[in-house]
């Protein structure tokens, strides 16, 4: 009898999340992995820190050594060769420099940075001294940076109050080295949300009705992870951003409230539609 050949192993598209653990499961590494899984992308991780938090707030933060962070990045790239990298909370300058060195060492591609600075509860997650390190060492390695309005102000070092300010801020952030900038409009007032994408040459605005919900914990993590997943799957930047916005909006429309405080987007909204 003829021997049957061994079935070819399925190798999924892989993405790497370099961020911090959220013990409440709503943001950080946990939100990234859920988002990757929803897109059919294998998620790998490199943790910069862990948090003790729940839906009411952040209780404590434990930072991992820059050396250990670098070893996690090296371990992932040595085996999985991720097609995209999402970066979240890094907390301070030593970890920022370790991540930048790792991205250079492995020639990482499709790098998406969510410049997390303050938690939903108001806890500072990026030291003021680390901001300059992020601007100098990390932004030049990013294919896309996704600040909200306060983060855009910090990165661009200007006040953002008008549409013209947003365009100026996007240009200033791009001048720091980022290949593209998505300034999110969720923090602005009004019945619509305007997300502004600057690809280094042209501006594209994504406008949609605001979804009124308290399920907003981890939305920045989810959006940036969804963009990274779509880039890993081969979509171009504008399409990846549009798909990610649509994914997040679907999740917000089906918000979940697992604890007594904040709620989170549903990371698998399509599964409910097909059930």
Image: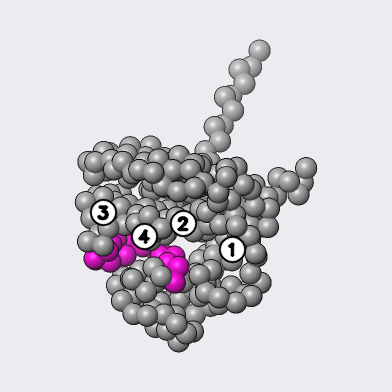
Q: Residue 259: horizontal and vertical position, in percent? A: 57, 43
- Closer-to-camera residue (28/262): 262
* Eye-nearest disc, 4 or 1: 4
Q: Mark 4 and mark 1 in contact? Answer it, CB < 8 Å.
A: no
**Residue at the location (45% across, 55% down)?**
121
Q: In what element is the residue under mark 1?
A: helix
Q: Earlier in the sequence, mark 2 or mark 1?
A: 2
Q: Marks 3/4: CA distance? A: 10 Å
**Magenta includes 133?**
yes
Number of the label disc, if any, that sits on residue 60: none
Residue range of the region highlighted in magenta in the rendering: 131-149
Residue underneath mark 3: 92
Query: Alpha-carbon neighbours of circle 3 within 10 Å: few (<14), some, or many (≥20)?
Result: many
* Eye-nearest disc, 2 or 4: 2
Q: Main secondary structure of the magenta part?
A: helix
* Eye-nearest disc, 2 or 1: 2
Q: Residue 104: horizontal and vertical position, in percent? A: 27, 54
Q: Earlier in the sequence, mark 3 or mark 2?
A: 3
Q: Mark 3 and mark 2 in contact? Answer it, CB < 8 Å.
A: no
Q: Residue 181: horizontal and vertical position, in percent? A: 43, 71
Query: Alpha-carbon neighbours of circle 4 within 10 Å: few (<14), some, or many (≥20)?
Result: many
- Closer-to-camera residue (204/192): 192
Residue underneath mark 2: 120
Q: Earlier in the sequence, mark 4 or mark 1?
A: 4
Q: Marks 2/1: CA distance? A: 20 Å
Residue underneath mark 4: 117
Number of the label disc, if any, that sits on residue 245: 1
Q: Report the quarter where the C terminus lies.
A: top right
Q: Marks 2/4: CA distance? A: 10 Å
């Amino acid at each position: 009898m003829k021997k049957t050949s061994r079935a070819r192993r399925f190798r999924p598209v892989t993405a790497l999340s370099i961020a911090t653990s959220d013990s409440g499961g709503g943001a950080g590494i946990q939100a990234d992995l859920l988002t990757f899984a929803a897109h059919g992308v294998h998620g790998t991780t490199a943790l910069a820190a862990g948090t003790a938090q729940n839906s009411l707030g952040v209780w404590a933060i434990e930072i991992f050594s820059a050396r250990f962070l670098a070893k996690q990045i090296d371990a992932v790239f040595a085996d999985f060769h991720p097609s995209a990298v999402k970066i979240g909370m890094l907390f301070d300058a030593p970890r920022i420099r370790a991540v930048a060195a790792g991205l250079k060492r492995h020639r990482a591609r499709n790098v998406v940075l969510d410049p997390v600075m303050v938690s939903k509860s108001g806890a500072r997650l990026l030291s003021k001294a680390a901001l300059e390190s992020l601007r100098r060492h990390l932004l030049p390695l990013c294919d896309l940076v996704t600040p909200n309005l306060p983060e855009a102000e910090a990165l661009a070092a200007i006040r953002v109050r008008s549409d013209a300010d947003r365009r100026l801020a996007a240009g200033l952030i791009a001048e720091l080295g980022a290949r593209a900038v998505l300034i999110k409009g969720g923090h602005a007032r009004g019945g619509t949300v305007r997300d502004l994408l600057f690809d280094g040459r042209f501006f594209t605005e994504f406008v949609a009705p605001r979804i009124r919900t308290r399920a907003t914990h981890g939305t920045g993590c989810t959006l940036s992870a969804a963009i990274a997943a779509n880039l890993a799957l081969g979509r171009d930047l504008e399409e990846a951003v549009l798909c990610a916005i649509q994914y997040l909006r679907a999740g917000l429309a089906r918000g979940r409230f697992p604890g007594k405080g904040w709620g989170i987007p549903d990371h698998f909204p399509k599964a409910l539609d097909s059930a």
